Image (tube, rainbow, N blue to C red):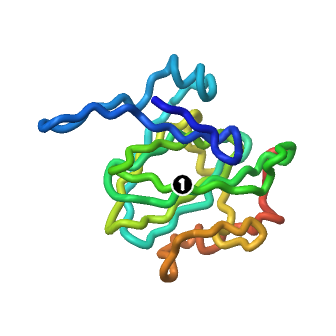
Amino acid sequence: MEYTELEIPDVVLIEPKVFGDHRGFFMETFREDEFNEKVQDVRFVQDNHSMSGKGILRGLHYQIKRPQGKLVRVIEGEVFDVVVDIRKPSLYFGQWVGVTLSAENRKMLWVPPGFAHGFYVLSDSAQFIYKCTDYYAPELERCMLWSDETIGIKWPVTASPVLSAKDQNGTLFKDAEVFE
């Protein structure tokens, strides 16, 4: 696999080696020893799988007190995936980075603990898989407003995105609980 640190150095884009022929393809999607050496020494405890339709935007979500690191990838369709650094001591506090993840490009993104995360579906539908370093704790889940101008994410939206009630009512960055 190829590991590339993005503009926020702790966020890593991972491109697996894909071996294909007339029968299909094979690729490793996670290898603990390599990941721990090249990215971060972590232990994954939960895998999640979601499906969303075109124009749906999920996020910006995070868990306070028990932050989750996430290794995310798309197995069907295409999304614009975004992370925001909400670690107050970080040089990158309040900055964001976004990448396109798709079934076609097979790229994966490492979202470290201490980041808010969200994605926007570009294709007719998308299936999204992510490995988490801590268990989901709904009482600790927080949501920042996806369109907060302070953060200034340049979402590739062509119309009003479809949002959950939680995402419509996300907290502004200036009022959000962050990691001290």
Left or right placement of residue 157 versus residue 5 in this view: left
41 or 168, nearer to the observer? 41
Residue under the image location 79 percent in, 46 percent down? 87
Measured as percent of width and height from the top left, residue 99 is found at: 54, 54
The quadrant of the image that shows the N terminus is top left
Q: Looking at this view, is 126 or 34 the one in front? A: 34
Left or right: where 178 falls relative to 97: right
Give the answer, above or below, for where 145 lies relative to 128: below
Please provide percent x and percent y for residue 112.
64, 39
At label 1, which amino acid type do we have? Answer: Val
User: Residue 94: percent from the left, percent from the top?
Assistant: 78, 56
Query: At 63% from the left edge and 53% from the top edge, which residue is drawn?
Result: 83
The reply to whether residue 66 is visible in this rendering is no
Residue 123 in sight from this viewpoint: yes
- Image quarter for residue 51? bottom left
Residue carrying label 1: 99
Q: Residue placed at 61% from the left, 29% from the top?
A: 39
Q: Residue furthest left?
A: 22
The residue drawn where x is 36% and y is 54% is 127
Q: Residue furthest front?
A: 21
| Percent x, y of residue 52 | 38, 63
- Element at badge 1? strand
Above or below, 22 relative to 150:
above
Q: Residue furthest top?
A: 33
Image label count: 1
**Left or right: where does residue 174 sit relative to residue 157?**
right
- Check disc 1: other Cα within 10 Å, few if <14, some if 14-19, many if 20+: some
Q: In the image, is residue 132 above or below residue 33?
A: below
User: Which quarter shows the C terminus?
Assistant: top right
